[in-house]
Image (cartoon, rainbow, N blue to C red):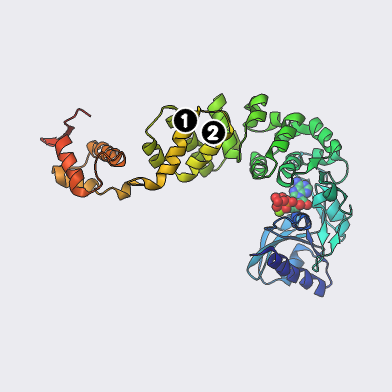
């Protein structure tokens, strides 16, 4: 889906609003990114139509937060988040407004948004409506809408969003915003971990991670971030990571912070990636045979750890070479997983005339390793020959004759 089509399809929604005497505009991140010439992956729309009216106007809608004014409208099978113009009530918990109020004025909706660069709207024919005339966007500065201290006080997540945008857009943070973050950093403690982690993931996918990390350390946000609060500041500023997972791996390896990883509430997949990466680092340190390393780890783990150890001083030059050889060797391994082994458990039981038992997995592990190291050829008769000369069935007990 090209973004041209995204805006073109979104324009149909706006035109439907206008045909029914409502207003509709593209808004927020999509307008910002379009104006900057950046790729746009999702397009949000804002309107003075109320949620019930939105549902009546379109055939396919999904209620994702009607009480806050947000409905997903499907147009030509594409989802668009459509939100009623709204203003927010008091924030007594530094997280969420106590109430939201719908309004008829675009300007009021834009004034509740976090940063000036995110408070722009655009018509269906791509004409910009920007109360700030693009001043901060041109100067590449992240500035809050209204007084920084108030805005960060209302919703503490905005502080992390500010540094996330620094990384994503390679923008500077306005001095006033920096001061206000330094003042309010402690309020991040009120924010749900999942929201923090989501911002951090975006931060690490950005193009200027270092500037964001410098700001996180300088303002004291780091001391209020799950997991990160335990990382030594010097180590944090020194490390070079291309993802949140890589950052975790570096500091768990260096500073034994594994007990604190759960604070980030990562997905099982992310946790598995971190665990595997740490295991690989241990295997490299223990100088495990490189064919075994190439076999044991998925390509993305091998390449990610390769990036980690090249950008950070975690292991010696010799270990780096070992990992590079493992990566180069991976496509040329005799087998890539156990299914490619020319025998399976049944074949072994038949050959030894034995029933299954713990011996079977020991035997398969051994064969797998010997085939991988090219000590046995991967064909059934070679393997059975090897088994017959290394393993015997002594009255139903399977024993390795070489004392394994
Ligand atoms: P991206 O989609 O690249 O993450 P975005 O700017 O679209 O960036 P979203 O989180 O999708 O960010 O939010 C959409 C818009 O909603 C923002 O551009 C901003 O106008 C507004 N917004 C989001 N979060 C907040 C917040 N915490 N406080 C105020 N306004 C917000
Ligand atoms: Mg968005």
How many marks overall?
2
Crowdedness of circle 1 by 10 Å Cα count: few (<14), some, many (20+)? some
Question: Quick check: 329 above or below 48?
Answer: above
Instruction: Say which residue appears at 88% left-offset and 44% top-offset.
Output: 146
Q: Position of residue 83 (x, y in %)?
A: 76, 59
Residue corresponding to mark 1: 319
Circles 2 and 1: CB distance less than 8 Å?
yes
Q: Is residue 352 left or right of residue 2?
A: left
Pointer 2: what residue?
309
Disc 1 CB within 8 Å of nearest ligand 1 atom: no
Q: Quadrant of residue 107?
A: bottom right
Q: Nearer the viewer, residue 86 or 229?
A: 229
Is residue 138 left or right of 253 when viewed as pictured?
Answer: right
Q: How far across and down, in percent of the image, does residue 349 sit?
A: 18, 44
Q: Which mark is residue 109?
A: none
Q: Within the image, what quadrant is residue 59 found in?
A: bottom right
């Amino acid at each position: 889906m090209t973004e041209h089509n995204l805006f073109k399809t979104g324009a149909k929604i706006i035109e439907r609003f206008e045909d029914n005497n409502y207003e509709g505009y593209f808004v927020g991140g999509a307008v910002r990114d379009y104006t900057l010439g950046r790729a746009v992956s999702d397009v949000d729309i804002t309107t003075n139509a109320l949620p019930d009216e939105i549902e009546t106007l379109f055939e396919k809608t999904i209620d994702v937060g009607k009480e806050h004014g947000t409905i997903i409208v499907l147009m030509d099978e594409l989802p668009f988040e459509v939100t009623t113009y709204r203003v927010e009530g008091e924030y007594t918990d530094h997280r969420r407004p106590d109430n939201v109020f719908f309004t008829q004025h675009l300007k009021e909706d834009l004034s509740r948004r976090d940063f000036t660069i995110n408070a722009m709207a655009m018509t269906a024919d791509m004409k910009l409506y920007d109360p700030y005339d693009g001043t901060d966007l041109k100067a590449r500065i992240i500035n809050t809408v209204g007084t920084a201290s108030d805005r960060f006080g209302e919703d503490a997540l905005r502080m992390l969003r500010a540094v996330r945008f620094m990384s994503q857009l390679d923008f500077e943070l306005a001095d006033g915003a920096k001061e206000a973050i330094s003042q309010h950093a402690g309020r991040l403690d009120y924010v749900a971990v999942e929201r923090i982690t989501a911002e951090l993931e975006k931060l690490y996918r950005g193009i200027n991670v270092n500037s964001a990390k410098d700001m996180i350390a300088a303002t004291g946000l780091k001391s209020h971030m799950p997991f990160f609060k335990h990382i030594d500041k010097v180590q944090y500023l020194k490390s070079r990571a291309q993802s949140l997972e890589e950052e975790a791996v570096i500091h768990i390896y260096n500073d034994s912070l594994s007990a604190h990883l759960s604070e980030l509430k990562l997905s099982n997949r992310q946790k598995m990636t971190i665990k595997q990466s740490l295991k690989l680092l241990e295997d490299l340190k223990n100088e495990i045979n490189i064919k075994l390393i190439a076999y044991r780890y998925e390509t993305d783990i091998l390449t990610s750890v390769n990036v980690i150890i090249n950008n950070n001083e975690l292991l010696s030059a010799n270990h780096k070479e070992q990992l590079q050889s493992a990566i180069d060797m991976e496509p040329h391994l005799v087998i890539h997983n156990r299914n490619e082994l020319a025998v399976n458990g049944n074949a072994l039981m038949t050959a030894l005339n034995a029933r299954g038992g713990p011996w079977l997995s020991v035997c398969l592990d051994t064969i797998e390793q010997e085939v991988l190291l090219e000590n046995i050829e991967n064909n059934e008769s070679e393997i059975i020959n090897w088994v017959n000369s290394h393993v015997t069935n002594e009255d139903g007990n399977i024993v390795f004759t070489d004392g394994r």
